[in-house]
Amino acid sequence: MATLRGVVGTDEFVGLHTPEIGQIDRALVDECLVSTFVSSVGPFVTRFEAEIAEYTGARHAIAVSNGTSALHVALVLADVRRDDEVIVPSLSFIATANAVSHAGAHPVFVDSDAATLGMSTSALADMLSTMAPTDGGLMNPRTGRRVAAIVPMHTLGHPVDIVGICAVAARYGVPVVEDAAESLGSFVGERHTGTFGRLGVLSFNGNKIVTTGGGGIILTDDDALGALAKSLTTTAKVPHEWEFEHDAVAWNYRMPNINAALGVAQLTKLEGFVDAKRRLAANYRAAFADVDGFTFLDEPEGTRSNYWLAAVRIDTDDRADRDRLLRAANDDGVQCRPLWNLLSEQQMYAECECGDLSTARALVDSVICLPSSPRLAS
């Protein structure tokens, strides 16, 4: 605990990740309020989409209500249908599996890679090698279902081996939809996460590096999918000066203008946030370098992580040791959290197919996420 207090430099309560709200945020939200365009129509939505597209390098960025709705629609756009299967990492936030269920499909869980914390390329390849090619696509011979998509997730902002995963997916003809919810500001080489697959998604929840209060983005380079994403997330309303005509069953998932106003303001500070979080990560790395039993989790080689949540791994797979450290930190007013419980062990997904998950289980038992707000950097 002394190590953590020394890094954060305060005796007050320290949250895991608190939003940085300042004068420009208040000014643009107030401008939106004065305009009265606070719902799903307004210039800030268009501006936010354009600025995200420019930053990430995606051709299209479609703003929606949250990251889960973004992933739901992205899966539908990738042609995931009812009773298909979608391969996802078992170690992920619940939204990754829930979005598959919202699309009417079934998640299939694979193991993680200890270096990236994300989906294991070799575990994915092993899983796909057991599937059967058919005229209708890849089929799971154990269930008779079509394997419709693969959803890797960039865990804690650290880029997964997305190049390797996309290569394996291409070999089997299965589309990749990237869950980049936590990785705005993270790059593989010069390329932003969320832009490698057919589609990708970002999240702007209150605890993300940039927040819109609640919100998400669908990224794609496909012009037709971009147009369809915008239509399906705005009730598929046919443009007209006054008529209410709709051409598909769709969703009311559009991001409100007031949320986008906050997002536009936050984007002016994104690079500063990333720099601060990387300095904070360096501070943690140095602080834990000489502490026996702890390993700071660094960005994977060849990547630039936003370090959304800095984390350490304790040199034990005994969850009781992890929990004792979490209890001590939280009792001391330093909010630390573990990784998520495995999705395959959640009661609604316990019967889903999964491969060997030994690495993912070991990570759950041994990783502790540290306070990572940009303001904590020195």
Image: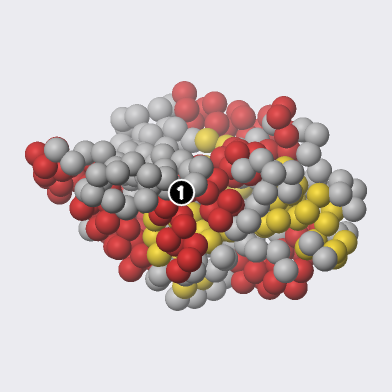
Q: Residue at x 56, y 56 (%)?
A: 77
The colour scheme applied to this rendered structure is secondary structure
193 vs 130, nearest the viewer: 130
Q: Is residue 238 above or below residue 174?
A: above
Q: Is residue 371 visible?
A: no
Q: Is residue 91 above or below residue 327?
A: below
Q: What element carries label 1?
A: loop
Q: Residue at x 78, y 63 (%)?
A: 137
Q: In x, y percent, where is residue 139?
A: 83, 57
Relative to residue 191, is residue 126 drawn left or right?
Answer: right
Q: Which residue lies furthest to the bottom in this view?
A: 190
Which corner quadrant of the image does residue 103 belong to? top right
Classify mark 1: residues with Cα within 10 Å, few (<14), some (14-19) or many (20+): few
117 vs 291, nearest the viewer: 117
Q: Which residue is drawn at 62% across and 71% down?
A: 163
Q: In x, y percent, where is residue 10?
A: 31, 37
Amino acid marked by disc 1: Asp
Q: Is residue 218 above or below residue 348?
A: below
The residue labelled by disc 1 is 247
169 vs 105, nearest the viewer: 105
